[in-house]
Image (cartoon, rainbow, N blue to C red):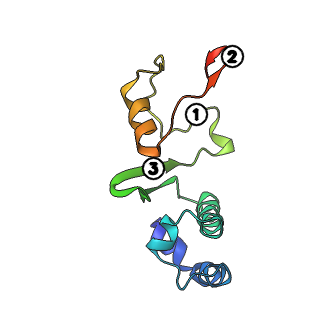
Amino acid sequence: MLVSRALHHSMGLYFSEAIKAGHNDFDAALLKNASTGARRITQAVSSYLYNEPGVDGIQFVSRHGDELMLWCVYEQPHEGRVSKHLTSLNQFKLTETTPELLQAFELFGLKWARTTAGRI
């Protein structure tokens, strides 16, 4: 099922929620907005799609830049421990020098917290 078709049936509800939250429209800019009101709307859209038969996940661009493509895979309760759509699962040790972790820290302006026991 096309996600756009599934969303089309509920657009009125989301447009109404967007207006109530103080936004002028229900559009891509709103879906990238980090405000609490906009976040509630994006969560409602995702929740709606999670419950739509045939929708296994969504692909979307990050609010941190259109070049950052993100995915959300909906793991359904009937699928067991891991979604059938996750076929290449790898485990690896995550350290404070893992390049992807360092990139995430830089992207979000994060720093390690110091505790009496060292870093957490």
Q: Which residue is mark 1?
A: 82
Q: Is residue 87 left or right of residue 81?
A: left
Q: Residue at x 59, y 65 (%)?
A: 35
Check disc 1 and report its element: helix, strand or loop: loop
Q: Which residue is mark 3?
A: 71
Query: x, y (%) of residue 13?
Result: 65, 81
Q: Which amino acid, mark 1?
A: Val
Mark 2 and mark 3: Cα distance apart in space: 37 Å
**Image quadrant where residue 119 sits:** top right
**Image quadrant where residue 105 sits:** top left
Q: Which residue is mark 2?
A: 116
Q: Which mark is residue 70?
A: none
- Pointer 2 or 1: first along the chain: 1
Check disc 3 and report its element: helix, strand or loop: strand
- Pointer 3 or 1: first along the chain: 3
Mark 2 and mark 1: Cα distance apart in space: 37 Å
Residue in front for this viewpoint, 34 or 51: 34
Check disc 2 and report its element: helix, strand or loop: loop
Residue in front for this viewpoint, 72 or 107: 107
Query: x, y (%) of residue 16?
Result: 64, 84
Q: Which amino acid, mark 3?
A: Trp
Mark 3 or mark 1, which is nearer to you? 3
Mark 2 or mark 1, which is nearer to you? 2
Q: Residue at x 43, y 38 (%)?
A: 104
For residue 10, above or below residue 88: below
Mark 3 and mark 1: Cα distance apart in space: 16 Å
Query: x, y (%) of residue 38?
Result: 60, 69
